[in-house]
Image (cartoon, helix red, strand yellow):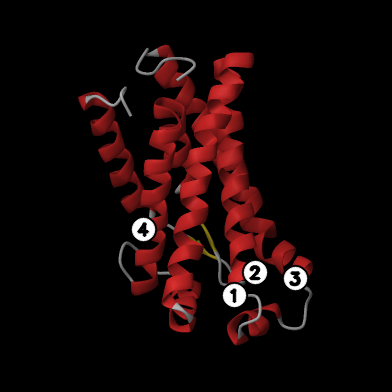
Amino acid sequence: MKHFNTRNFVLLALLVAVLVVLGYVNIPQPAGLSITFNMIPVAIAAIALGPAGGAVIGGAFGLISFLQCFGICGFSGMGAALLGVNPFLCFVQRFIPRLLDGLLLGFAYRFLARRANPYAACPVTGFLAAFLNTLFFMTSLVWLFGGTEYMQNSMAGRGMLAYIVAAVGVNGVVEMIVSTVLTGAVGSALIKAKLIRPAA
């Protein structure tokens, strides 16, 4: 946190604002999940500010995701249903995966940027942002709520693996492609403009 100066706090504030805007542009899917691009600001924070910045914006993503269960900053039908089942576990399931995603992305970018081309590390970080977000979110969903009536109805007699594949098949691929391209472009632009250090 010693490297956090006024410019970095302004960047964090801007990324939180982007998160709020993106919270309203989720694309609902039949399985109750949505295509979301909120992992992109998390990846940008991880690139620009390292693990600490990634964790802060990842945590903000998690809080916004939880607020959507109440219809704030968008709405999540699945979140509202899980909130009715267990509010505490709903918060854990919405918040912890996104916080962990941001933290690990910061370490991943740092590792890749020091051992390879930092420009190549940006799109890889974007891909990991979407991949880890999906992995952590679905794992926590099944682990915390897999035995509930809501999840059993959603699974409709399918096994856990079949449900996960069906639920994230489309949105997971779309999120990974978009996050890879946009994070690569924005991260590279920030490096070229010398607004961030190549191996932040």
- Label 1 and label 4: CA atoms lie apart by 20 Å
Residue type marked 3? Met
Q: Quadrant of residue 83?
A: bottom left
Q: Which residue is mark 3?
A: 160
Residue drawn at x 53%, y 23% as measured from the top left: 110
Distance, label 2 to label 4, CA atoms, is 21 Å
Please state, as top left, top right, bottom left or bottom right, where the N terminus lies in the image. Answer: top left
Marks 3 and 2, the one that precedes in the sequence: 2
Q: Are marks 3 and 4 in contact (CB under 8 Å)?
A: no
Name the residue rendered at 64%, 53% in the picture: 135
The answer to whether mark 2 and mark 4 are in CB contact below 8 A is no
Q: Are marks 2 and 1 in contact (CB under 8 Å)?
A: yes
Residue under numbered circle 4? 64
Q: Which residue is mark 1?
A: 145
Q: Tell which circle, 1 or 4, labels the residue nearer the N-terminal end.
A: 4
- Res 192 label: none
Query: In the displayed structure, would residue 197 be above or below residue 140?
Result: above
User: Which three-letter amino acid code belongs to the residue tagged 2?
Assistant: Val
- How far apart marks 3 and 2 lie (CA) works out to 8 Å
Q: Earlier in the sequence, mark 3 or mark 4?
A: 4
User: How far from the left and from the top, in percent, is residue 84?
Assistant: 44, 83
Q: CA distance from mark 3 to mark 4?
A: 27 Å
Q: Residue 199 in the image: x percent, y percent?
A: 49, 16
Q: How far apart, in angstroms, are the residues tagged by discs 2 and 1?
A: 5 Å
